[in-house]
Image: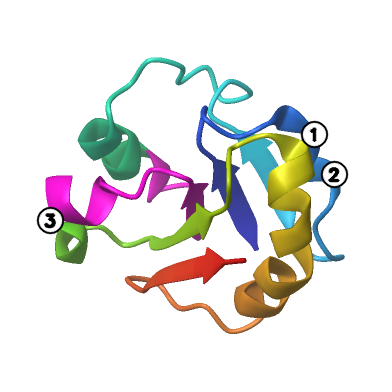
Amino acid sequence: MRVLLDENLPRKLKRHFDEGVEALTVGDCGWTGIKNGELLRIAQAEFDVFITTDKGIPYEQNLSIFAIAIIILEAKSNRFEDLSVLLPRLNEVLKSVRVGELIRVAV
């Protein structure tokens, strides 16, 4: 499974996924600064899941037109220390997430 981490997430997060998950950041792909709609359009060709902390994305984008799952992480902040508590649940969700789903993973 290929996972794309939004640029609002710490790079360090990509080293904490279970085996079988290849995680890259928006920066790794050279897509820094691309807006969400265009980013999702590009990402759906190469990734299965897009992970972000942007809670507004479901309201700003018509997610039904994208062939990619979206996971929104909800924590106190987007610092690694605050997001790391979500990793066990996130890794569980990744085992069953399907293209087109929107899932929120919260504390």
Dot 1 and dot 2 residues touching (CB under 8 Å)? yes
Graded by Cα atoms within 10 Å as few (under 14), some (14 to 19) or many (20 or more), the crowding at tag 3 reads: few
Dot 1 and dot 3 residues touching (CB under 8 Å)? no
Q: Give the range drawn in magenta.
A: 43-60
> Which residue is located at x 66 percent, y 38 percent?
24
**Quadrant in which the C terminus is drawn:** bottom right
The spot of residue 69 in percent (x, y) is 41, 64
- Between 91 and 100, the one nearer to me in the picture: 91
Disc 2 target residue: 15
> Which residue is located at x 52 percent, y 27 percent?
7
> Which residue is located at x 73 percent, y 70 percent?
91
**Quadrant in which the N terminus is drawn:** bottom right
Furthest toward the front, the residue is 76
Q: What separation in Å lies between label 1 and label 2 (alpha carbons)? A: 6 Å
- Between 51 and 21, the one nearer to me in the picture: 51
Horizontally, residue 81 falls left or right of residue 3, namely right
